[in-house]
Image (cartoon, coloured by chain):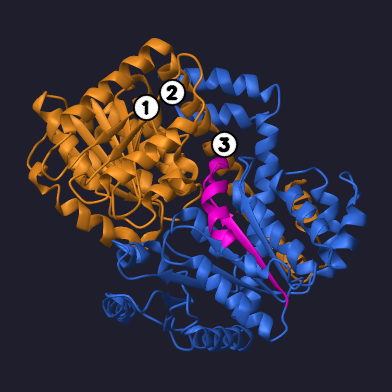
Chain colours: A orange, B blue
Amino acid sequence: MAERAEPEALVSAAEGGDPRALARLISLVENGSPQLRSVMRLIAPRTRQARVIGLTGAPGVGKSTVTGALVRAYRETGLRVGVLAVDPTSPFTGGALLGDRVRMQDHATDGGVFIRSMASRGHLGGLSWAAPQALRILDAAGFDVIMVETVGVGQAEVEIASLADTTLVIVAPGMGDSVQAAKAGILEIADIFVVNKSDRPGAQEAIRDLRSMLAMANYGEGAWKPPIVSTAAMSGEGIDDLIDRLNAHATWLAESGEGERRRVARAREEITVLAVAQVRERLGALPGEARLEELAGQVASGKLDPYSAADELISP
Amino acid sequence: MAERAEPEALVSAAEGGDPRALARLISLVENGSPQLRSVMRLIAPRTRQARVIGLTGAPGVGKSTVTGALVRAYRETGLRVGVLAVDPTSPFTGGALLGDRVRMQDHATDGGVFIRSMASRGHLGGLSWAAPQALRILDAAGFDVIMVETVGVGQAEVEIASLADTTLVIVAPGMGDSVQAAKAGILEIADIFVVNKSDRPGAQEAIRDLRSMLAMANYGEGAWKPPIVSTAAMSGEGIDDLIDRLNAHATWLAESGEGERRRVARAREEITVLAVAQVRERLGALPGEARLEELAGQVASGKLDPYSAADELISP
C-alpha cells in the first residue's frame, strides 16, 4: 500500500480488514491531515454504531490489564474489538503507553483485534478533536466493540470518556488517594465502577468508600445506578461479571433512549469542536498572527485588557 | 460590601486588601459573569507582574504541603502570597480540594495570604478561560507571589501550568507509577522537579529515574536545565533549597528574556481563548442551537460527515 494512497483506496482497504490501511487512516487523524475531510465524507454512510466503551482511572490501577481481559472475553464470543489508547498529555508520552501496550501482545496476531496508541500532536483542538474521528474510522471499519482507554481523571479524560456509550472508572486499592481522586469530577461520568486488583489489601475499603459515595448521590426515576464490580484482571477474576454489567448497561441505553441521546450529543460536540478549530485557524492565519502578537504585547504590559484585545482580533 | 457591588467598588476594595472583595471578583470569573469585561478593563493598568509559580503532580504527592511550606517561607520574607488551587475536573471536585485546603488553615488569619479553590463551572473554555483572569485579579490586588496548584498531569493541567513563570513538577516515592506518569508529557513543562516525601523508601530511585530521564533530554546553549530538589515538605526539609532554585530560575527568566517571552505568549493564548469562546458562544446561540441539533442528528445517523456539518454551521 503506497504511502500516499488516495482516501478512497485507504477506506476500502480498511473496510476489507487491512490493519495497515487502518493504521494509516488513524495517522491522518493524529497529524490533522487535510485529507481527513474526504475520509470523513467517505465513511459517513458506513456508520455502523459500534459499541464504544471508555476506560479511565489513575496511572497504575491496571487499565490496560482490564482492557486486555475484556478484549479476550469479547473475542471468545466472536466480536471484533478495536482499542484506542489515548493520552491527553503531549508528544513525550509514547514511552509510558507503549510499555502498557506490550502486555497486550498476545492479541498481536489476531486479525479481529486492532490496538492503537494515540497522542495529541498539539494541533488545534487536541484529542477532543482527534479521538472522535479515530472512533468513526474504527466504527466504519467494522469493529463491533471499541474500547477507548485514557490515563488519569483530568478534564481531557472526562471529555474523551464522554465519547463512550459506557464509561468504566477503574480504581485500585493501595494507590494513594485513588478513590479520593476518583471522586473528583468523575462521579458524573462513571456508568460502572471497577475496583481492580481486588485481591490486594484495601480492596474492601475502596469498595466501601465508593458505596458510601454512591449512597449520597441522587438518582432520578429510571436512571442508571452505577454498579461496583470487583476484578482481579490479571487472573481474569470478575471479568464475566463485568461483561454482564456492560450488557445490562447496553440494554438500558437502548430501552431508555439514552443511547441515542448520547450519540447525538457526541455528534453535536464533534461538530462544534471542528467549527471552533476552523475559526481558530482563521484567527491564527496571517495577517491575524502579526496582529495577535502585537495585541499580546499590549496585554502583557497592561496597556490593554484581554477582552478588548479579543474584540479587536475578531472584528473585521 | 453589597452582593451587587459595582466593578469599580470591588476593584478598589480588592486593591485595598479586602479579602471579601477579592473572593467576590474571583467568583465573577468562576461564574463567567458579564461584569468581567469591566473588571478586566479596570485592572489592566494595575498589572504589576507578580511572580507566578505553578505546582503540579499526581494526587497524593503532597502538592498542598509543598505549597503550604512555600507560603510560610515567602511570608517570612514579608512577601504577600496568593494561592489558586485549580481543579480541571468538574463540579463535583469541591470535596477533595477542600480537604487539602484544611491543612493550610494556619494561614487563615494572615492578611498577607489569600487562598482560593477554583473549579471550572462548565462554562465555555473552562479553566483555560478562567485561570488567567483569576491570576490577573490577584496580580492587580498586589500579591507578590501567586501559586497555582493543579491536580494531575493531564492536558488541562499542562495548559494551566503554562500560565506560570516557573513550573514545579512534584513526584513522590511509592506513588505507583508516579515518576513514569510524570514523564508523560510534563518533561517539557517542568522548570524544577521536586521529589517530595524524600524521607520515604524509594526516594533515591525516584531521583535516579528523573536524573536518567533528564540526561536523555537535549538542552541547547543557555537553556535552563531543570534541577531536581528533594523535599520533605511536612517537616520543612529542603524548602530553603527549593526557594534558592526558584530564585535562580527567576534570575534566569529575567536575564535570558524568557520571562518576557512567556508573558507575551500567555497573553496571546489568553486573547485567543477569549476570542474563540466568543465565537463559540455565537455558534451556540439561537437559531444556531436548533440548527446544530439538527446537524448532530444527521451526523449521528451517518447522513452527513462532521466536517460538512461544521461548514454548514459556520457559513452565514
**Tags 1 and 2 in contact by the CB under 8 Å rule?**
yes
Q: Which residue is mark 3?
A: A275
Q: Give yes or no for residue B24 being in the magenta stretch.
A: no
Q: Are marks 1 and 3 on the same chain?
A: yes
The first of marks 2 and 3 along the sequence is: 2
Q: Percent x, y for residue B14?
A: 84, 62
Mark 1 lies on a secondary structure that is loop
Q: Nearer the viewer, mark 2 or mark 3?
A: 2
Q: Identify the amino acid type marked 3.
A: Ala
Which chain does the residue under circle 2 lie in? A
Q: Residues within 10 Å of mark 3 (few under 14, many from 20)?
A: many
| A175 to the left or right of B150 | left
Residue at (45, 70) in percent of width and height: B169
Q: Is residue B27 above or below residue B285?
A: below
Q: Give yes or no for residue B98 being in the magenta stretch.
A: yes
Mark sitting on residue A263 = 2
Residue B26: image quadrant is bottom right
The quarter of the rendered structure image containing the N terminus of chain A is top left
The quarter of the rendered structure image containing the C terminus of chain A is top right
Q: Nearer the viewer, mark 1 or mark 3?
A: 1
The first of marks 1 and 3 along the sequence is: 1
Which chain does the residue under circle 1 lie in? A
Q: Which residue is mark 1?
A: A165
